[in-house]
Image: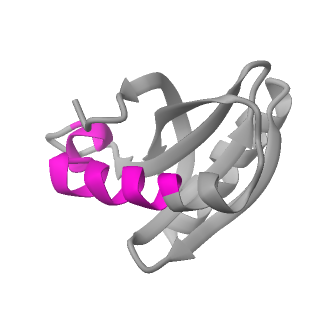
Amino acid sequence: MTGDYGELTALRYLRFHGYKIITVNYRCKFGEIDIIAEDRKYICFIEVKTRGESSYFSPADAVDFSKRSKIISSANLFLKSYDLKRQPRFDIIEVYFKDDEPSDLHHIEAAFDGNGQ
């Protein structure tokens, strides 16, 4: 449930900051992308990770090379299916919870590139 609430928090943040949401929970044979959104010049493929206040690791640490590779493959399939004239960008949104409520959010733009680095 915390993951769903984290995604909802991320969606509200993105809309507030002028992003146009294209789709949520895009699924294909390669995996899932939490949020796909348009920014001024980018098509953003966004992974949302949530953590509680007692977590020892940052949420972004959970997006390892294997997860990044799945996101990139899914994004490539999405881009082949839709004629969008924007540069792709891979973001991570970290949502932190305290007492079952979102307490902090970090949007890491261009968290990794198309090679997973």
Q: Return the residue nearer the eye: 7 or 34.
A: 34
Q: Residue 27: where, in percent of width, then height?
A: 55, 75
Residue bounds of the magenta highlight: 58-76
- In the rendered image, residue 75 lying in the magenta stretch gets the answer yes
Image: 27 above or below 2:
below
Residue at the image position 71 percent from the left and 29 percent from the top? 86
Residue 98 at least partly seen: no
- In the rendered image, residue 61 lying in the magenta stretch gets the answer yes
State which quadrant residue 60 falls in.
Answer: top left
Q: Return the residue nearer the eye: 110 or 95.
A: 110
Q: Return the residue nearer the eye: 107 or 57.
A: 107
Q: Return the residue nearer the eye: 11 or 34.
A: 34
Residue at the image position 49 percent from the left and 53 percent from the top? 76
Whether residue 105 sits left or right of residue 84 in the image: it is left
Residue at the image position 27 percent from the left and 47 percent from the top? 63
Magenta segment's dominant SS is helix
Residue 9 at least partly seen: yes
Residue at the image position 43 percent from the left and 80 percent from the top? 29
Total labels: the figure holds 0
Whether residue 115 sits left or right of residue 104 in the image: it is left
Quadrant of the frame with the C terminus: top left
Q: Residue 113: where, in percent of width, then height?
A: 35, 29
Q: Residue 83: where, in percent of width, then height?
A: 77, 48
State which quadrant residue 30 falls in.
Answer: bottom left
Q: Residue 40: where, in percent of width, then height?
A: 79, 19
